[in-house]
Image (spheres, rainbow, N blue to C red):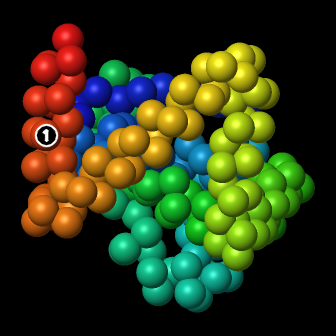
Amino acid sequence: MSNESIIQVFEGINVRIVWNDEEQEYYFSIADVVQVLTDSTDVKQYIKRMRARDSELNLRWGTICTPTRMKASDGKYYQTQAATLEGVFRVIQSIPSKKAEPLKQWLAEIGKQRIDQMIDPEQTFQMAVEDYRRQGYSDKWIENRMKSIRTRNELTNEWKRSGVTEQKDYAMLTNILRHGAA
């Protein structure tokens, strides 16, 4: 794990985040996320009651949450219950709060879109184009971006056919190409 905590402010509440270099994932403080979505005055008790209400969450708590070194408000580092985005989404499902409801509805919509994309993979490309347009990119930029994605996928598929299996090998080959193009 990276030693540096990232602090994001959401609705006036600090949410601590740490990047895990090894897993290439962010870990979010569960207490901070619960605080944002519940306005609880005692987050530890809220989490305890939430786990008691949801036996499946409680059963999987050790795999959802990982003790992660994060900087506290006193400036010191402590082991803090943290989870990846997937784990955070699971915890959110167990929060019966009006503040959590819009997030749950958004997650349901994203889930539906992903299932639709699995049924019709063409939708994935259409969604990417729409997202790039929404971000203000030109049609020419989007076209070049989509071509580069196709080319990269063809290249990595060729590497896979040639026996490359380790993530570090893909990274090394990509780095060689990047330096060769510079």
Across and down, in percent, residue 81 comes to: 40, 55
Q: Is residue 48 left or right of residue 73?
A: right
Please name the amino acid that badge 1 sits on.
Answer: Leu
152 over 115 or under it: above or below: above
Neighbour tally class for label 1: few under 14, some 14-19, many 20 plus, Cα within 10 Å: few
Across and down, in percent, residue 168 comes to: 12, 48
Across and down, in percent, residue 50 comes to: 64, 72
Q: Is residue 154 left or right of residue 84?
A: left
Q: Secondary structure at mark 1?
A: helix
Can residue 115 be seen here?
no
**Which image quadrant is residue 97 in?**
bottom right
Q: What residue is drawn where x is 21% and y is 18%?
A: 181
Across and down, in percent, residue 27 comes to: 40, 47
Which sits in the foreground, 143 or 33?
A: 143
Q: Which residue is mark 1?
A: 173
Which sits in the foreground, 4 or 22?
A: 22
Q: Is residue 170 left or right of residue 97?
A: left
Where, quadrant-wise, is the N terminus in this rendering? top left
Which sits in the foreground, 55 or 76?
A: 55
Which sits in the foreground, 4 or 21?
A: 21
**Which image quadrant is residue 162 in?**
bottom left
Q: What residue is drawn where x is 13% and y is 20%?
A: 180
Question: Tag count in the figure?
Answer: 1
Where, quadrant-wise, is the C terminus in this rendering? top left
**Which image quadrant is residue 56 in?**
bottom right
Can residue 6 be seen here?
yes
Q: What residue is drawn where x is 48% and y is 26%?
A: 7
Q: What residue is drawn where x is 28% and y is 52%?
A: 156
